[in-house]
Image (cartoon, rainbow, N blue to C red):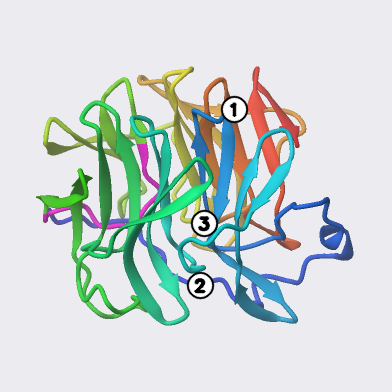
Amino acid sequence: MKNHAFVFTVFFIASALLPLPDASLEQQQEDKPKPRHLEEVAYNESEEALYLFGGVELIDKKWQAAHGLYTFKNRWYLMEETGPVSRRGSTMVYNSKEMSMIVIGGVDGDSVLQDVWQCANKEWKFIDANCPLKEARAVYDVSKDRILVYGDAHNISSEWYGGDPRKFELWEFKANTWRKLSDRGPEGPFPLTYDTRQESLSFLQWNESNQLALWQWKSDRWSMQTFDGNIPPPRNKYAFTYSKSQHALFLFGGIDSEKNLLADFWKYDGKQWIKLSIANAPSARASLKLVDAGERIFLYGGVTKEGITNELWEFSNNQWKKK
């Protein structure tokens, strides 16, 4: 499926773009994670807790792997049990049937990882070593009790630095078995979410005319809906999630083609895109995470004009609150 996508140069944000955090960011409460980049965040419904794993920290002006699994439930807690090697750029989802967190892939140093790990009751278990994709993004498909994994299938043992070919595919991981669903996926990778009302994997894409497309995988095929007019402008490194309680898609922030950080907040209710103007909202940022958490939406981290941050925000009752 050929697309003329709105694509920025993929970049690993360097210290020139990321000034060192000010001293106030170093004053951490007990067990609170330090600011990090390329981490993964997901919500554990059974524990009503936010999980944070992986990424890299800027220490003495050098990027170093961030260790430990953190959970947030009124405050941060660090879990140090033996588990997967520290990594950046992994994907993590919650499996509601098994009430466990699943971590897939990522990069350790210069090594691209294809492993799958499960965390249940605060204990890690190795599951598989054969993920067929790199730069994987994933969602849990509750309707079919499976994990949908989307990423680049070209030369999966090497990172993509630009220039070499890309081949985006969609795979299913179910009962510890991989099955290819589509080898004609739209160009990516992009933030993914799972729309429980539509029973679909969903993500956004802008074309060369700045038209917005909503791609969905449902009923075992790709579909695309396009939007004009009042829509989120083109961007990269934004956050995107589906709210089950509001039956709506939400988008926050990102970075535009001129490398301007964005702070706009959008909602798609199934009929139209609505720009939300809410007082005391998070500042402009890119590479952040937006996570559905029942009646709430969590926003974590990102790159602000001051540098990487470990801020945690909660959106509920049409208000933002810094945690």
Indicate which disc, 3 or 1, sits on the residue closer to the N terminus: 3
Indicate which disc, 2 or 3, sits on the residue closer to the N terminus: 2
Q: Is residue 298 above or below residue 23?
A: above
Q: In the image, which disc is placed on residue 12?
A: 2
> Which residue, given by chain and number where applicable, does mark 1 sit on?
276
Q: In the image, which disc is placed on residue 74?
A: none
Which x, y percent locates residue 12? 51, 72
User: Which quarter of the image is occupied by the C terminus?
Assistant: top right
Which x, y percent locates residue 23? 88, 65
20 sits left or right of 118 in the view: right
Mark 2 → mark 3, Cα distance in angstroms: 16 Å
Q: SS for tag 2?
A: loop
| Residues marked 2 and 3 touching at CB (< 8 Å) | no
Main SS, magenta residues: loop
188 sits left or right of 223 in the view: right
Residue 221 appears in view: yes
> Which residue, given by chain and number where applicable, does mark 3 sit on?
256
